[in-house]
Image (spheres, helix red, strand yellow):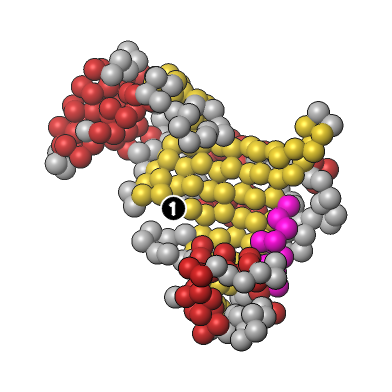
Amino acid sequence: MPSYDSSRARFRLADRHIAVLARLLNGENPADELWPALGELMQIGLVGEEGELAPILRDLLGALAAPLVLATVEVIGEHGTINHGVMVGQEAVIAYEGWPGEEESQYTPIAPHSLVWELARMVNLQADNEANSEVSRIETTMGALDAALSVLDEGKGDEAATRDLIRKALIEAGAPREPELSEFTELVMALNAMWRISTAWDGKHDGERAAMVRALAVWDCGPRGYWVREKPEEPILEGQVGPERELFLVRTRNGKIWEKITDLLPDKEDLIGEGDAPVDA
């Protein structure tokens, strides 16, 4: 069920509610399958009887209708895939965050200057001063990773047994030699989440108008630190990654990752028709 907090202009909305609002904003009637969602929005007063949109939706709908920059955050962890992101509009910046097992995401206006901080918070970027390793780079294949992940649950809570199973699976899949083999084993053991931040905007390439995309993919390995995934290179389209594809991981300190997140955002001059856009890294 959707809801909103008028004191902070924040909303809890599912994708189906966003689809209804987008249709109404364009002067269109929602499709038949969206009528239950329309009824829910009407029930809490965000949509009137004639399809009119509540004034409190102004900033959200402005960013939704004409985003200057879209930042999407995909986090894959214990609870599956959770999606977050930020929409940068002409007059407002709206962050949205998902929650495991919940249909709705929370949409909240944020200050433009906090954009990088918000993205870092969404991926839980933390200090990593205790993470040390003699290995700073691992080169293997996606097939080796698939083999390691496939045996994670076979150790039945026995850490030593799980480690041995992962190591054996990696060797059989042609994983790298020592010391990279042991380090990769420990990374899989310690893996908290894999996350990816992608940004997209309407820009120029070779003087022509074009959709511009930047992305950063990282492994959060808890006590073993952060590892940037250099290969497969982003952006990755569905079906592009097979077991033979290279997997390159590079140990990267949290301060450098903060810089990489900042570099994902375009400068104001990179945007087409950005006006007084509130993009401020």
- Magenta stretch, overall SS: helix
* Snapshot quadrant of residue 65: bottom right
Relative image position of residue 22 (x, y in whole percent): 63, 65
The residue where tag 1 is placed is 82
Say which residue appears at 28% left-offset and 19% top-offset. Answer: 173
- Which is nearer the eye, 145 or 51? 51
User: Residue 258 vs residue 144: left or right?
Assistant: right
Secondary structure of residue under mark 1:
strand
Relative image position of residue 246 (x, y in whole percent): 44, 20
Say which residue appears at 16% left-offset and 37% top-offset. Answer: 154
Task: Give the residues in magenta.
Answer: 58-68
- Which quadrant does the N terminus fall into? bottom left
Q: State whether residue 135 is above or below residue 22.
A: above
Say which residue appears at 78% left-offset and 32% top-offset. Answer: 205
Q: Is residue 239 magenta?
A: no
User: Residue 92 vs residue 162: left or right?
Assistant: right
Q: State whether residue 77 is above or below residue 251.
A: below
Relative image position of residue 203 (x, y in whole percent): 77, 41
Query: Crowding near pointer 1: few (<14 within 10 Å), some, many (20+)?
Result: some
What amino acid is labelled 1 in the image?
Answer: Ile
Q: State whether residue 22 is above or below residue 266.
A: below
Q: Is residue 25 visible?
A: no
